[in-house]
């Protein structure tokens, strides 16, 4: 995607020296991010930290088409300092198209959610090293509400970070867990390229316990008009004889009795009609506003009470096909526990059996990717994911980057870290309600009792401590009252230890990607990174 007149740092070093000299005249403590330096036409562009804030620095003869905060010249050329605003991020994406997200289609990818807006360079470094394809902007509406960031803020932070790292290989932007048309509108306007529709509020988790008349009446009460079929036709399509799925070694048979079909339909029927409605709304919005662009679509039912059986997955996939909803990825609720921030809990053999069946169904029903939510830190299942679906995988992580960032205060600001732990204890019972965790608070020592050198291991290497901090991030970051100074001090500290922060993230993500294994060997789309 690089333009003919654009080049990276190698042949710009002479001008980069002049740029750095001018930056130093503005602020002696300024930093130039060397990977960001690029020449386009007659100007030099780079990201710099000046007077404590990141700016786009442009060295050129005339003012660039960015909002400019300050300028200084050395008699020959002028240095323009442009603040990292939303408008300037938009300009940057248009001038350097590789800083904008793209659809990734069925390429295996890793979702790198970042609740702070500071983690992306660490994610990029891990993906560069391993060859993995990243979704760098990935935030659920719930996370955005809890962290006080808009869809635009999330995408803009990523835009600047991609520029900072000079990462030209392309990335995705996932508007995660969308539940309404308003959610879609906000993310579409911001420029996302992947939309994850979450119809879990419409999943009927009690379907498995229904029998006889009640089951039949709930089945008959489904939104059949919206589903474009009838109860009789639905029964006809799936019952009577086993359905063979896939071929060769991986093939399997799916069998529905009238009772199991009705249960599958009751469980997922309303969710399917909701998904179809939002998918059509999205398609229409693209036709109206971004007619030349493609996008990725996911349906996620991971946040439901009961696992999605392979049979139910087949039903959902076959119905999506019948309804003409084409997904790039689908997130079932897998067997066992995918708790936040810690390894898988459950029977690995049972997981592998079910996962193989899910893979066969996904391949036979359109070849979409299986999407693994709460996918961070599941080191015991990664080899299984890689072996069966390495080329068709979407692994989403989010809160784990926040936990990794907390290593910095645990190492360098023990009092701030203790304060965060205390506040997390206060907030835990309220904040846990929307999360799937089994944290044992009694097993976590009080921070006052833990010596400085043991803080990191006690809270960040321990399942209970990790979950305590993982699910209270919203309270810790909300910036209201008691936490406002915590937020400010954490951000200042992470900026002071910027490279170390990126390094803990790089290590953590390389470990994830390499344990999955297969993620790293696939040719990636787009030009190689510079
Ligand atoms: Zn999820």
Image (cartoon, helix red, strand yellow):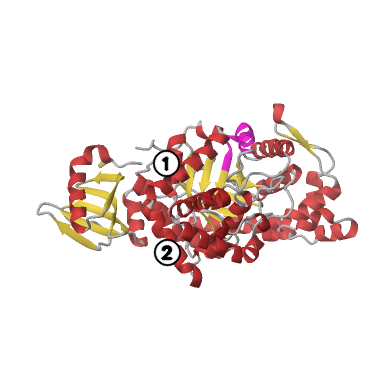
Residue at point 60%, 53% (across, down): 465
In this view, the residue in front, 489 or 211, is: 489
Residue 290, position as x, y percentages in the image: 45, 55
Q: Is residue 391 visible?
A: no
In this view, the residue in front, 380 or 221, is: 380
Q: Is residue 200 left or right of residue 235?
A: left
Please tell me the numbered disc located at residue 488.
2
Badge 2 marks a residue whose secondary structure is helix
Query: Is 293 in the magenta?
Result: no
Residue at point 90%, 56% (across, down): 212
Query: Cβ of disc 2 within 8 Å of ligand 1?
Result: no
Answer yes or no: do the residues labelled 1 and 2 have beta carbons within 8 Å?
Answer: no
Which picture quadrant has residue 517? top right
Query: Which residue was labeled with disc 1?
Result: 125
The magenta span reads: 381-394
- The quadrant of the image that shows the C terminus is top left
Residue lying at the far bottom of the rendered structure: 481
Query: Is 392 in the magenta?
Result: yes
Please tell me the numbered disc located at residue 239.
none
Which-is-in-front pick, marks 1 and 2? 2
């Amino acid at each position: 995607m690089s333009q003919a007149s654009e080049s990276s740092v190698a042949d710009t070093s002479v001008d980069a020296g002049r740029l750095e000299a001018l930056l130093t005249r503005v602020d002696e403590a300024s930093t130039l991010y060397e990977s960001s330096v690029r020449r386009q036409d007659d100007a030099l562009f780079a990201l710099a930290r000046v007077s404590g804030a990141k700016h786009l620095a442009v060295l050129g003869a005339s003012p660039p088409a960015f909002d400019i905060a300050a300028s200084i010249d050395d008699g020959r050329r002028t240095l323009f300092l442009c603040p990292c605003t939303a408008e300037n991020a938009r300009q940057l994406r248009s001038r350097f198209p590789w800083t904008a997200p793209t659809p990734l289609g069925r390429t295996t990818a890793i979702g790198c959610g970042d609740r702070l807006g500071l983690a992306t360079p660490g994610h990029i470094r891990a993906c560069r090293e391993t060859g993995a394809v990243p979704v760098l902007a990935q935030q659920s509406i719930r996370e955005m509400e809890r962290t006080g960031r808009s869809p635009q803020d999330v995408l803009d932070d990523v835009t600047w970070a991609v520029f900072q790292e000079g990462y030209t290989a392309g990335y995705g932007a996932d508007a995660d867990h969308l539940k309404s048309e308003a959610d879609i509108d906000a993310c579409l306007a911001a420029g996302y390229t992947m939309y994850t529709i979450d119809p879990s509020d419409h999943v009927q988790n009690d379907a498995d316990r229904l029998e006889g008349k009640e089951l039949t009446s709930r089945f008959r009460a489904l939104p059949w008009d919206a589903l474009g079929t009838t109860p009789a036709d639905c029964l006809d399509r799936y019952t009577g004889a086993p359905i063979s799925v896939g071929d060769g070694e991986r093939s399997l048979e799916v069998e529905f009795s009238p009772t199991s079909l009705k249960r599958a339909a009751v469980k997922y029927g309303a969710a399917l009609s909701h998904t179809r409605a939002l998918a059509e709304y999205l398609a229409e919005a693209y036709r109206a506003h971004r007619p030349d662009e493609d996008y990725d679509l996911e349906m996620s039912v991971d946040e439901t009470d009961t696992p999605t059986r392979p049979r139910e997955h087949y039903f959902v996939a076959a119905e999506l096909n019948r309804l003409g909803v084409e997904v790039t990825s689908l997130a079932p609720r897998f067997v066992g526990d995918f708790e936040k921030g810690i390894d898988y809990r459950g029977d690995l053999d049972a997981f592998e059996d079910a996962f193989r069946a899910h893979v066969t169904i996904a391949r036979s029903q359109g070849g979409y990717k299986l999407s693994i939510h709460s996918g961070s830190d599941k080191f015991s299942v990664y080899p299984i994911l890689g072996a069966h679906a390495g080329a068709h995988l979407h692994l989403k992580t989010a809160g784990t980057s926040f936990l990794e960032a907390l290593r910095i205060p645990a190492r360098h600001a023990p009092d701030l870290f203790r304060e965060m732990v205390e506040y997390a204890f206060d907030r835990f019972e309220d904040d846990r309600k929307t999360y799937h965790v089994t944290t044992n608070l009694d097993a976590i020592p009080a921070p006052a009792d833990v010596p400085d050198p043991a803080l990191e291991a006690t809270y960040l290497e321990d399942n209970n401590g990790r979950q305590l901090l993982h699910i209270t991030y919203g309270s810790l970051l909300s910036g209201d009252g008691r936490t406002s100074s915590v937020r400010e001090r954490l951000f200042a500290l992470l900026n002071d230890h910027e490279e170390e922060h990126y390094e803990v993230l790089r290590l953590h993500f390389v470990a994830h990607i390499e344990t999955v294994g297969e993620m790293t060997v696939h040719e990636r789309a787009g030009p190689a990174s510079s």
